[in-house]
Each structure stands twice: as C-alpha cells, then as structure tokens.
Image: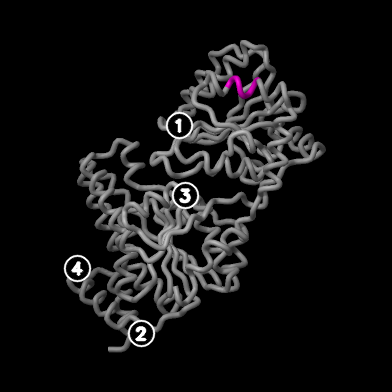
Amino acid sequence: MCFSTIAVVSILSLITPAPFVVRAILLLGFIWFYPRQQDASLVYVLVLGDLGHSPRTYNQCASLIKAGKKVVLFGFLESSLPPCSEDHIKNKSLIIVSLSSFRCGFIKNNLLRYFVKTVLQTIAIFSTLILSGSIKSGSTPAHFLVQNPPSIPALFVVYIYCQLYDVQFVIDWHNYGYSIMRVQKANSLLVKIAMFYEKLMMRLSDSNFTVTNAMKTELVSHGAENISVLYDKPHPRFQKLEENEKTEFLQRISSSFPELKGALKKPLIVSSTSWTEDEDFGILLDALKICRDRNLALTVAITGKGPQKDFYKREIKKLDMKNIEIVTPWLEIEDYPKLLGAATLGVSLHTSSSGCDLPMKVVDMFGAGCPAFALNFPAIGELVKDGKNGKIFNSADELAELIIDHLEKPSLISDYRENLVKERISWEDHWSAVASPHFSVTS
C-alpha cells in the first residue's frame, strides 16, 4: 500500500469511530511507510504550552527562518502569535501545527488524573508529529528543538521520534520541570520520577541550550554533552523613552490608571510579578513602608496577573502610604515596554525554583534602559551585575535602603543606564554566534 493511501486511511481512522486495534495498526502502518527522506533545511520545534506566551521559543523559530531554515512549530494555540509570524506563515517558512490539550477534570484523584493526561498527551503528540507533521512538511527534519519545561511527556515523545527517523534531538532548557513541581508541592514520588526522567533526557540529547552558565554546569555534572549558554535578550521594542515620549505616554495611560499621572513629577518604580506564593511580594510592600516612613514620594506600578493579586490589592488599600502611590495595571502588549521605558528603577522579586534560570522581566527592564534591583538567588549575578547595571538585595530593609540611596544620588542610575546601552547585544547577534552552529547539517 502506498504512503499516500496509508496517510488518508490513518487520518480517517482517527476522526471516525473505529476500534482501537484498527487505529493502532493503521498508525503503525503509517510509521512504516513514513517518508525517510530528510530535509537538511527543515527544523521541527515543539513547546507543550501556549505558543503566544512562548517568546523565547518563537525567537528561536524566527532566527532559524532568518538563517534559511523552514520551521514546523507544534504547540497550543491559546492566544495570538507575534505580528511578525504572519509574514513567515504567508511565505511558508513557518508552519503552525496545533496540539490537542487534555484537562481530564472529571478524574478526581490527582495522581490518576496526571497519569491519564500524560498517556493521552503522549499518544496525541506522537500522532500529530507523524501525521500532521509529515503531511504539512513532506519530509523528516534534520533537527528537532523542544522547549523544557514542560518536560512530561514532551522530551520522551520527541526523543522517540528522533530515534525512529535519525533526527538531531535538541533541548532548550529554560528551567527544570521537576523543580517547578517541587515548588508547587506535587506528589513527592512524581517529583523523583520527573527528576530521574529529565536527567536521563539530558544524557540522551544531541545538543542543549541553557539560559545560564549555572544551568550548563549542572547539565555537565549529570552527563549531558554539547551544551551552549544561550542567554535571553530583550526584544527591540524595549527602549528607553525620551522625556517627551515619556510625558506623552504617562498622560495617555493615566486616563486608564490615574495613579500613573503622579509619575510625571515623581520617580516611577516598576515591578512585574506572577502573584504566586513562590514570589514574595510582601518584600516590596515592606520596603515601601520604610520609604513611606522616610517621607519618600514615589509612584509604584506593579504589573502582572496571578492568584494572589486580589489579596495584595486589598492589603494595599488598608495602608496609608502618604506620598507613595501604588497601582497594579494589566497593560496592553504595546504599553508594557513603554512603561519600563518611562521607569526610574525596576524591582524583581523572582526566585528561581532551580536556582539556575533568570527573570525575563529583568531582561526586558534592561532593554528599556531601566536599572533593576533583584532579589538574590544563585544565578542572578549572571544578569544583574551588582553596581554596574543594578543591585542585588536580600531583604526588604536592603531594598528600601537601595531605593532611598539611589534616588538621593541619581548619578548612580545614570551610570547604570550608560552601562546598559554599552553592553546591549541583540538576540540575533547572540543567536548567530551561539545557536546557529548547532543547526548545521554536520552537527
């Protein structure tokens, strides 16, 4: 039976009622007849998450396309893609393949629900790679790049695919899935299994990217090879606003958030938070109380969404902050870079679940020429150079003293900004130097 016939029958069997055994046989037949011709310019990319909220993965795709590759991107289509994706899709250098998601909310037992969801996702992802991927691209890729986390079952499925069709298995390590599960207080047995699983996948990969040198060191210690540190870089839309641009923006945005009008005359401090238990917003609130008691006049904008946002908004309302105005806006995508570009200082309360990843919010602040004060954790020194582009703090008291000291000595902030401009490297230049060699035909 020819490949095209198998393909048609397989797809029909998946979308029409058919016994499971029949579907399994047809899928195995499809795998057997699947075209083995490999296209050296084709790269598959998979993220087990929303493509619209996966900026680093999309940056990888855009850079691959610029380097002359054709990309098939697999993921969930839950929000809109970046505007630049439209041109890539039109000229067929980018093909989007939507993955099916499974909630399994009807299963009450958490462990059983996780197991069933994982099995269903494994089958669905593998079927999509084999069926949709082959039909849309017409051949097998030379490389397969997968974002981690989410880890389960994405790494396993991609590894099996790469073994079947002799494809280079490339992992982009943003963090560790097991460390996030541990912070979220997942079942301890699951966490141990996830840790073993990820460490195994490290050793089985052909190439690896990490977001920090600390993460690279860990991968090496676990037996991984061919590892490059690919730092996140700010998007070009993040730029410092000139005074007239700042005034225009604040006047416009204050119609929606009146508190921001105060930033026309007072220093503006910005922070972005996920409002979750692993990011202690109370540190910033306590620091602002100290600033209030020292009669500082500030406007503080804290962006983001999350489960604890309403709780902290109620706590803020209870406080008499005198000359300190606090606003918690949810901004349009084009306004967030402008808010950072208008800011005097930024604050990051990010603490890494692994100690090895870096806060993208600080990368964005630096792109907008906004120096940052960051809460200390092992890898943060790779991004925030203490005394060069910002400062690192350990407590609310230290943060308050840093804010007071730097607002009294604005020349320090100016120096940080100059350093940010001098040291800025574009994502494209960094990617070309670090990542491009991994996608050569001989890699």
Q: Quadrant of residue 429?
A: bottom right
Residue placed under numbered mark 1 in the picture: 279
Q: Which residue is mark 3?
A: 213
Per the model, the C-alpha gap separating discs 2 and 1 is: 52 Å
Q: Earlier in the sequence, mark 2 or mark 1?
A: 2
The CA distance from mark 4 to mark 2 is 22 Å
Q: Which amino acid, by three-letter code, is at mark 4?
A: Phe
| Colouring | one colour
**Residue type at the position of mark 1:** Glu
Nearer to me, 362 or 53? 362
| Rendered residue at 20%/46% (across/down) | 112
Instruction: Point out the tag, 4 or 3, that comes first from the N-terminus.
Output: 4
**First in sequence: mark 4 or mark 2?**
2
Residue interval drawn in magenta? 400-404
The residue at the point 21 percent across, 76 percent down is 25
Mark 2, residue position: 4
Q: Quadrant of residue 418?
A: top right
Q: 316 left or right of 152?
A: right
Question: Earlier along the polypeptide chain: callout 3 or callout 1?
Answer: 3
Classify mark 1: helix, strand or loop: loop
Q: Which residue corresponds to the image point at 57% horizontal and 15% vertical from the top-left?
A: 289
Q: Is residue 434 visible?
A: yes
